[in-house]
Amino acid sequence: MNLSGKLVSWIMAFWHKRLAVGCCIVLFSCMMNANNIQIVRDDPPLDPTLPAWVYSVALLKVYFSDGTYKEGYATLLKNGRYIASSETLYSNGLYPKMILAKMQDSSAKELICIASLHLEAIDRDQGLSLLKTADFRDDYCHKREESYYHARIYAKYAQIFHSNPYTNQKTPNSDLYYPALNEGNSFSIQTTDISVAELLKSKKFLSLDASFKKGSALWGGRPYFSEVGEFMGMASSTLENQKV
């Protein structure tokens, strides 16, 4: 699959074009935006201690025609699209046969099947991919029509890129927060040893050593947020370091 013009026009305007070496956090400029959101009702969160951004995170189940299976993170964007790491969506020269997204809503603690996705564009040099919702799924991953539950997640929790970098004054002094899948099949919140200030000062992709993956087999596409909920970047690796 070639990098399409749609990828160039839709995403590359927002991606900071920088060199990368090895496993890295891809730096973004984006923030939550509530414009044009219409919600019929606003259910109280099941766990008020969790930040709103956790409900924009999806766990991908990726299947390939040769029997290969992969898992990775993705982050929900506007218009039913998701951003993910390219290595999750490519295996042994193959692109996915099926992609399922599971998410955690504020009305349900465990991850629940949400949608089937298809790969819209991929840039393996930058380590990024763009996915689009193909159809919606029920709790058992069977195809169904879009429900209030689906519409609520897509309208309320989608991340929106912003052209002005990090206008919130708290951001530079913030830790980096990320989701981790726990034994209860839900997301818990973890922090890194890297601050937002370090990420901003790097002026490039921030290279990470082996300790970044320690204790976590699942890291591809893992998103990172500031204390105030700004989407700062995601974990990925570049083409030159992928063994495919």
Image (spheres, rainbow, N blue to C red):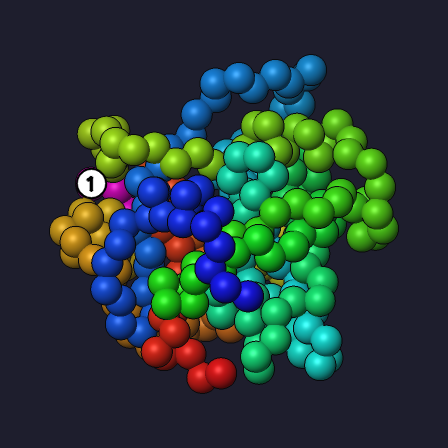
Q: Residue furthest front?
A: 5
Viewer can see residue 5: yes
Viewer can see residue 106: no
Residue occupying the point 44% across, 34% down: 160
Label 1, secondary structure: give it.
helix
Residue occupying the point 51% across, 52% down: 130
Residue occupying the point 46% across, 50% down: 5
**Vertical order, 149 against 18 (above or below):** above
Q: Position of residue 44 (x, y in %)?
A: 63, 24
Part of the protein shown in magenta? 172-177
Q: Nearer the viewer, residue 124 or 199?
A: 124
Q: Position of residue 122 (x, y in %)?
A: 49, 60
Q: Position of residue 76 (x, y in %)?
A: 54, 43
Residue 174 magenta-drawn?
yes
**Vertical order, 91 against 6 (above or below):** below
Along the horizontal axis of the image, is 161 left or right of 47? left
Residue 113 magenta-drawn?
no
**The quarter of the displayed image where residue 66 is located:** bottom right
**The quarter of the displayed image where residue 81 is located:** top right
| Tag 1 residue | 172
Q: Position of residue 39 (x, y in %)?
A: 64, 18
Along the horizontal axis of the image, is 178 left or right of 68? left
Mark 1, Cα crowd under 10 Å, few <14 / some 14-19 / many 20+, is some
Q: Nearer the viewer, residue 91 or 225?
A: 91
Q: Residue furthest left?
A: 201
Q: Dividing the image into 4 quarters, which one contains the N terminus?
A: bottom right
The three-letter amino acid code for the residue at tag 1 is Pro
Residue occupying the point 19% across, 48% down: 200
